[in-house]
Image (cartoon, rainbow, N blue to C red):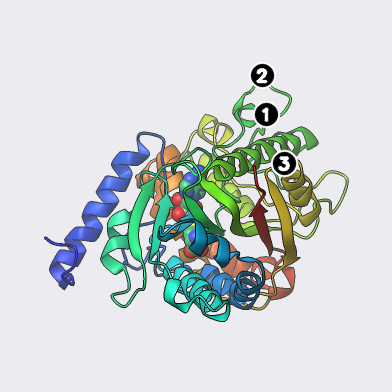
Amino acid sequence: MTLDTPLDCKHKKQYEFNVRDEVAEKCKLGLHAMNGGEGPNSYAQNSTYQRGVVDAAKTIMEEEIAMKLDVKHHSSTHKMPFRIADFGCSTGHNSFPAMQMITEAVEKKFHTEGLASRVPDFQVFFNDQLVNDFNTIFHSLPPERNYHAAGVPGSFYSRLLPNASLDFAYSSCALNWLSRAPAAVADHTSSAWNEGKVHYTGARHEVFEAYANHYANDIQSFLEARAQELVSGGLMALLVPAVPSFKISNTSYTTPTEMDLIGSCLVDMTKRGRISKEKIDSFNFPLYFTIPRELQAIIERNPSFSMERMEILNNQGKLTLTSAHARATYLRAVFEGLLVNHFGGEIMDELFDRYTKKLAASSLFLDPNNEKSIIIFVLLKRKAE
Ligand SMILES: C[S@@+](CC[C@H](N)C(=O)[O-])C[C@H]1O[C@@H](n2cnc3c(N)ncnc32)[C@H](O)[C@@H]1O
């Protein structure tokens, strides 16, 4: 089957089945990604929130490219393509409009600088974890795109591209994923052991601290890798999932989150003998939601970048999926690979069924006023060596 012919229904079903099989196989290796394919539980069909983030960032990104991108330098120093990378692009459906917007804004900048004849070719690198469904990206590439596409598999916490080869780095809704959950929170001999819980919300201070330290180290690794890959003067736009503040009481951090609700479903299943307690005690979501002040301090510790702009994105109102079913499917598209990896695929239907029922019964989770997540927009410029 070639990737550029549309899939008929029968092949599409088989393809999605193969994708699931393949993901389950790779999960056994300890890797995970968003749900692939384009079926009802896929990330592609359940990421309108992330698409809203791209839309909300459009004006700021265009403004920043118009003001800060040094196209004179690019056109005078090389006849190379203008290279852009999207770090953590998943199956691409939200990445394509972002890449279109960036390439058009760069092209416009060449025109306004009187360099219309020097508009370069564009090359876009789509990065995600090795187990990501790259087939779906390439299969769904917009036919009218104005760039050449390439896939770059691997963790964005390490080097992925050659030295000084990248003109523009971009990442949206991905830098809340840690390289892994901190080891100490699953270690029963550690003071940060997160017994009976699956995330840091409402957990002891040691648990939260282990997560915060891990996050700071991960972001430093990300910045160090990108500092080597970006050309001097290259820009990096980051859309980082976050919360406005950490502490809501002395013992509890952030607001109750979906991860806790999944945790409580897992605990219910333990009580019914469906999962062992050890399985829960050894599982923690590898996710962390920073606050603006903390992210700024981490970035400012890195000597290779200047902070050009940082603000909270105005995407309020697009955050809350008010139907329990829509919210559960959205979460399933994001977390299923991770959960299958640890708990096995057999319990997924029951887990998400329980989750949907808990959500439907909860006035807290479906009330848009309780939605506390924010997106921090950050624009960085690679300093000259
Ligand atoms: C919620 S999705 C966002 C996808 C896309 N950027 C969007 O806005 O729709 C987060 C993506 O980050 C990817 N990701 C998480 N950790 C990663 C890592 N260390 N290296 C590369 N990709 C990673 C996940 O596999 C997933 O595809």
Q: Is residue 111 above or below residue 281?
A: below
For the N terminus, the quadrant is bottom left
Which residue is pictured at 26% across the width and 53% down the height?
19
Decide if ligand 1 comes within 8 Å of the CB at mark 3.
no
Which residue is pictured at 65% across the width and 39% down the height?
220
Give how far apart the Cα atoms at labels 2 and 1 are.
7 Å
Q: Label 1, on which residue?
A: 193
Position of 165 compared to 17: left or right?
right
Give how far apart the Cα atoms at labels 3 and 2 are.
37 Å
Position of 329 compared to 223: left or right?
left
Residue 232 seen from this side: yes
Helix, strand or loop under label 2: loop
Helix, strand or loop under label 3: loop
Q: Which is more N-terminal, label 2 or label 3?
A: 2
Of the numbered discs in the image, which one, if any, rests on residue 189? 2
Q: Quadrant of residue 12?
A: bottom left
Residue 354 seen from this side: no
- Pinpoint residue 248: horizontal percent, then vertical percent: 84, 54
Q: Amino acid at mark 2?
A: Thr
Decide if ligand 1 comes within 8 Å of the CB at mark 2.
no
The number of callouts visible is: 3
Of the numbered discs in the image, which one, if any, rests on residue 303? 3
Q: Quadrant of residue 378?
A: bottom right
Give how far apart the Cα atoms at labels 1 and 3 are.
34 Å
Q: Is residue 347 above or below residue 75?
A: above
Q: Are marks 2 and 1 in contact (CB under 8 Å)?
A: yes
Front residue of 376/60: it is: 60
Residue depth check, mark 3 versus mark 2: number of the one nearer the observer: 3
- Pinpoint residue 135: horizontal percent, then vertical percent: 27, 57
For the C terminus, the quadrant is top right
Q: Amino acid at mark 3?
A: Pro
